[in-house]
Amino acid sequence: MVLTMLFIGVAMVASLADYHLLVSIHRPLGIAILILVIIRYVNRKLNPPPEFIATMPPEERVAAHYSELLMYAMMFALPLIGWGMLSAARYPIVLFGPIHLPPILPHSPMLYAVLRKTHTIVAYLFFATFIAHFSAVLFHTLIMRDGLIDRMVPWRVRGPEINPP
Amino acid sequence: MPDHSLPPPEERPSAKKLLAMLSEPRTAARMAILGALVLCVVGSFAYVGGWLSPGLLTPGRFADGFQEVFGVHPGFRRNHAKGVCVSGYFESNGQGTRLSKARVFEPGRAAVTGRFSLSGGEPFAVDGPAAVRGFGLRFEPRHGGQWRTAMVDIPVFAVGTPEGFYDQLLASKIDPATGKPDPAKMTAFLAAHPETVRAITIIKAKPFSSGFDNATFNGLNVFRFTNAAGDTTPVRWSMVPVDAFAPEGPADAQDKNYLFDALIARIRRGPVQWHMIITIGQPGDPTDDATLPWPDTREHLDVGTLTLDSVAAEAPGNCRDINFDPLVLPDGIAPSDDPLLSARSAVYSQSFTRRAGETKEPSAVTPAEVGQ
C-alpha cells in the first residue's frame, strides 16, 4: 500500500493524461496510511516485534532498528506534509465525493512551496530506505536462508538452516 | 531500544564462511535473483516517474515550454501571467439543481473570487486585441462545495490534445530576429493539425468584444453534471455578459493596460454582471474534443447571475495566490473524457508550484492603477 503510494506519487507528477485520476487516489490513500500507521505503531508498542535473529551482527541490528524507526517516522510525516501543503495552497482537501478535510495550516504560497519540496524529498528518502531494507531482507532470505523473513510474515518460511562453522 | 548484544558466536556464519557460500553456483544464482528483484522495483519506479522517457511530455516539460517561449518571470503564472483580481457573488436561481446536486446551484448566494487575465506568459505584456482574454473563478457556497473554473472568450479551443497545445505553443514562439513567430513552423503545425484550422475558422467568425465586461467567457471543455437522482448529463458552461456588446477597437497606444483600466473604471461605476448559461449536451455530442462546438439548437439553461462589485491589484492572499485549477470541482460536477482537462490540472499545478516558491514583484496592473 505504501509502496503503491510512492509509485502513484512519482507517476502523477510525470503524467498529463492520468494526473487527475492519480491525484484523486493519492489523497484518500495518504490519509488512510496516516491512520493505519498510527494504529500499527500503537500495536507495535503494545506487542513488541520478535527479537532480531542470531545471524545478524550488532551493526546490522542497529541499522535494521533505525531503518524501521525511520520508515515509521516517514510513513507518518508524508501524509501530514501532504495535508499541510494542500492546506497552505488552499486547495480543497477532497477525500471522497463531498467528504473534505479541514485545512491545518494558514494560506501561504511560500509555505506550500517548501512543504511541496519536502514531500518529494522525504518520499525519495523513503523509497531509498525501503530499497535498502528490501535488499537486506532478500539477502537474508535468499542467500543466508536464516529464517529472518519469519520475523516479518505471519506464516513460516522454511529454508535449510546454515550449518554452524 | 532492543538488545543489540552479540549472539553466541557459533550461531553466526563467519565472513569467510559467507564468502565461500557466495562463490557456490547455487548461491550466485540466488544472488542474481536478488539483484533482479531489486532492479525490477527500482526500474519500474524510474519508469513510472518518467525518468526513462526523456521525450515524454510531462507537466514539468510543459511548464518549461511556456518558459522557453515567454521567458522566466519569477512569481507569475506561466500562462495568463497578466491579470487583475475581482470579487463579488453568484446568485443561483435554483434551476441548476435539475442537472447537478452541487451546492452552488441551490438557490442563494455564493461568494466569488475571480481573476481577469490575458493569455500568454508575459506578465507585463501590452494590452491589445490579439490576446485571448481569460476569466478564472472560485465559487465558495456557504456550506462547502467549492468550485473553480478557468474560462476564455473564444467559442472553442484551438487544440484538442495536450500534445497539440504544446506543439502550437512552441510553433508560436517569437523569433528574436524578426520579432514574429517563424511562419514555416506555424504552417507545419497547421498542416499537421486540421482540427486547429477548423477551430480557428469558428473562432474568427465570432467578433470579439471591446472589453472584459462585455465579453462572453466559455468553459470550453465538457463536464458531467450529476443531480440528486443520480442522472448524469454532459454540459458546457458560459458567462454571458449583461453589458451590451460592442466590437473590439484598435489598441490604445497611450495606455498599455487599457483593457484592464476600462474594466477597473467599469466596476467603479457599479457592479458588472453575467448570466451563467449551461449548455446541455445530447447523446452523440462530442465530449472529448474542445475544438468541436455543439449545435446551436442545444438547450441553454440560465442558472444564475454573477455580480462583480470589487476589483483589486494582485496581492498576497487574493486571486494572485489561487490556482484556478479547472478540476477543483464540487460533488455533482465531474470531468468528461476530454484529455485536456487532466493535462490542464497537471500543468496549472506545476505552474502554481513553481511560482509559489519564487519572490513576488508587483503586477503590471498596480494598486495605484486600481485606485486602492
Image (tube, coloured by chain):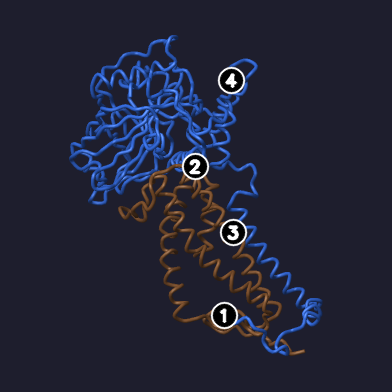
Chain colours: A brown, B blue
Residue A47 numbered mark, or none: none
Query: Which residue is at 59% across, 74% downward?
Result: A65
Nearest to the observer: residue B313 or residue B131: B313
Q: Label 2 near label 3: C-beta < 8 Å? A: no
Residue B2 numbered mark, or none: 1
Q: Inspect the image, locate mark 2, and give the three-letter code of the amino acid beneath it.
A: Thr
Residue B362 in the image, given as x and y percentages of width and height: 45, 27
Q: Label 4 near label 1: C-beta < 8 Å? A: no
Q: Say whether disc 1 or disc 4 marks the residue closer to the N-terminus.
A: 1
Q: Which residue is mark 3?
A: A125
Q: Which residue is mark 4?
A: B181
Query: Which residue is at 45% across, 58% downward?
Result: A79
Residue B353 numbered mark, or none: 2
Query: Which residue is at 68% across, 87% downward?
Result: A160
Measure how far apart labels 3 and 1 are at the Cα level: 24 Å
Identify whether B294 is placed above or below A89: above
Q: Secondary structure at mark 3?
A: helix
Q: Inspect the image, locate mark 1, and give the three-letter code of the amino acid beneath it.
A: Pro
Residue A62 in the image, given as x and y percentages of width and height: 63, 74
Q: Inspect the image, locate mark 3, and give the three-letter code of the amino acid beneath it.
A: Leu
Residue neighbourhood size for the residue with mark 4, other residues' Cα within 10 Å, grouped as few (<14), some (14–19), many (≥20): some
Residue A66 in the image, given as x and y percentages of width and height: 59, 70
Q: Label 2 near label 4: C-beta < 8 Å? A: no
Q: Quadrant of the C terminus of chain A?
A: bottom right
Task: Establish whether labels 1 and 4 are both on one chain.
Answer: yes
B228 on left or right of B285: left
Q: Secondary structure at mark 4?
A: strand
Measure how far apart labels 3 and 2 are at the Cα level: 21 Å
Q: Secondary structure at mark 1?
A: loop
Mark 3 belongs to which subunit? Answer: A
Identify whether A135 is placed above or below A51: above
Q: Say whether disc 2 or disc 1 marks the residue closer to the N-terminus.
A: 1
